[in-house]
Amino acid sequence: MIAVRSRGSRALVALGLMAVFLVAFPFVMPLIGGDVSLATRVLVLGLFGLGVDLIFGFTGLLSFGQAAFFGTGAVVTAYLLREHLVPNTLVGLALGTVAAAIAGIVVGSQSLRQVGVYFAMLTIAFSQLFFFLENAPLKAFTGGESGLPNVPRAAIPLGFTTLDFSSALGTYAFIAIFFFLSYMLMRRIIASPYGAVLGAILENPERAAAVGHDVLRYKLIAFTIAAAYAGLAGGLLGVFQGFVGPDAFSIDQSGQIIVMTVIGGAGTLVGPLVGAFIWLFLQSSLQSVDALAGVWKLILGIVFVLLITGFRRGVVGGIITFLRRRKKPLEADIATDAA
Amino acid sequence: MAILEARGVTKRYGGLVAVDNVSLDVEPNTITALIGPNGAGKTTFFRMLAGEIPPTQGEITFKGQRITNLNVTRVSQLGIAKSYQVTQIFPKLTVEQNITIPALAARRGPFRVDIFRAIGKVDGLKPLVQRVLGQMGLTSRAHARADDLSYGEKRRLEIAIALATEPELLLLDEPAAGMGAEETHDTVALIKQLREHVTIVIVEHDMDVIFGLADRIMVLQDGKTIALGSPAEIRGNARVQEAYLGGIE
C-alpha cells in the first residue's frame, strides 16, 4: 500500500521538485551538450506553454493564434524598456503582460462563441492580423521586419543599489523566478473551483452549461489568463535575447508552442516545459552535427511523429500512466486529481 | 399554487407543429408524467421547460417568473434541472467530481473567478455532494471514474448530476431507459424518495414506472394534449386507450 498523502503535501512536493529542478537545470545543461542560454529559452517557452496548457489541456480550446499575445507582450515590454519609459524591468514586464491580456480579451470575446475548428480558424485569422499590424502600420514602434534591437537586460534599481541580472546565469535566475511563481499560480488556478469548472468544460461543455455554469465567461477568462502568460513569456524573451523580431508573432511560433505542449503532455502543467526542452535540445544538437546540415529538420519531424504516436498523452502523460498502472486501480482513481 | 405553469406552448419547425398549444400546471412536491407515442412532442415540450429551446408561441413561468426567454444556464440557476435520456456525464472525472461540478454551480452561482480558493472551502459544498451521493446510492462508488461505472450506475449518476444543482423542479427524461427489471425497480424507489425534496416531471415509456410513480399524467399525441388527470382517470380514459395504451389493460 502506498500512503495516501493529502492534497496540500502533494502540492508542496511538486513545488519542491520544481524548485530543485530549476536550480539544477543550468548546471546540468552543459553536461549534456547544452548551455545556460538554451536552458533559459526552455523556461521562456515553458512559461508560454503553461498558458497554452490551461486553455488546451485543461479547457479543450485549441488556439493556433497564441503568438499574437507572445508577440504583443514582447514588443510592448521591449519598446518600453528601450525607450526608458519605465523605471525598471519589472514594470516593463507588467505592462507587456497587461497589454497581452487586453489583446486576449478582445480576441477571445470575438472568437470564443465559435467552437472546434471554427474557433481555431478565427484564432489564426486574428494572429495574422496582429502579424500584419506589427509589420506595417505599427512599424514605428515595433521596428517592423528588422525588429527591436538593444533591449536592456534585466535590472531593478533599488535606490541604494541596482539588482543586476545581466550575466547569462543572472538572466536565467531572473526568468526562473518568474517561471516558478507562474507555475505555482497555475497550480492554484487548476486546483480552485474555477479550475474544476474548466475541467467540466473540457469533458462536456453542454452539460457544464446545463447545470448552471456560464461557459462562455469561464472560457474567456481562461483565454485571457493564457494570453497574459504568453505576454509575460514574450516580455522575458526580449529581456533574455536583447532583441525582439517579427518571428515572435509568426504562425510558426503559434504552431510550435502547440506541438511542444502536445509532445510534453497537455493537461499536466510540466508537459510544455518537457516539450520545450525536447524540441530545443534536439534542434540545437541536430543542428550542430555537420553531416546532418541539410536534413536536421526532417529528422526532428520524424522524432516528433514517433513521440506523438508512441505517447498519446505526451511524454509526461505517458510517464504518469505508467506509474499508475503499477498501483492498484482504486488508488489510481484516488490520485486522479492535479498532476 | 403551481410551481410551474405552461400556457398555450407551441413549437413549430417550418410546417411541422411539434407541440401544439399545450398547457400544464405542476403543483409543488408532486410527480407529473408525460406520456405519448413516439413523435408525440414529449421531448420537445421537455426541452422548452429546461430552456434548451424557446417556444414559438406561449409562455412558461417558474415560481411566477417567465423563463421562455432565458437560456439553459439561467433556467438551471433559477432551480430547474434536467437529466437526459442519453447519459451526459463527465466521463474522465470521478463520480464525486461529477457531482461536485453541478454543486459548484448551485453554491457559487453561474460565474466566479475564485482562483485562490480551495474547492473544499466552498460553503456547503461537501455536505451537498455527500447527500446527493447517498440519495442516488453512489457513495461506495464516489472515487470510481465515471467511465468505469456500470450502465445502471451511469444512469443514476445522470440523475445525481441534475440533483446536485439543488433544483426545485427536476425534469427526468426516461430515467429507466435501457434498464433491466431489477434496476428499473430500484430507480423507481429512488425517485419516490426524491418527491419529498423536489417537484418532478418525468417522461417515460415504461408504463410500470409511470403508474408506480405519477400523481398526475398528461398524455400527448401529435403535439396535442389528449388527456390530463390522475393515473386512475388515465387508465379509464377511452380516448387514451384507443390512441396509445391499446392492449395494456
Image (cartoon, rainbow, N blue to C red):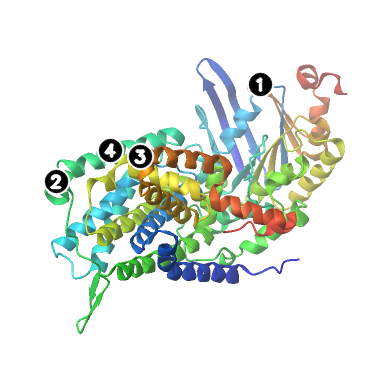
SS for tag 1?
loop
Q: Amino acid at mark 1?
A: Gly
Answer few, some or many: residues within 10 Å of disc 1's Cα (few below 14, many 20 plus, some between 14 and 19): some
Q: Amino acid at mark 2?
A: Lys
Mark 3 = which residue? A123
What's the distance in space between the residues labelled 3 and 2, CA to CA?
23 Å
Q: Residue at x 56, y 33 (%)?
A: B48
Indicate which disc, 4 or 3, sits on the residue closer to the N terminus.
3
Mark 2 = which residue? A139
Q: Residue at x 27, y 50 (%)?
A: A71
Q: Mark 1 near mark 4, Cβ–Cβ under 8 Å?
A: no
Mark 4 = which residue? A128
What's the distance in space between the residues labelled 2 and 4, CA to CA?
15 Å
Callout 3: chain: A
Can you tell which quarter of the image residue A96 is in? bottom left
Q: Residue furthest left?
A: A140
Mark 1 = which residue? B39
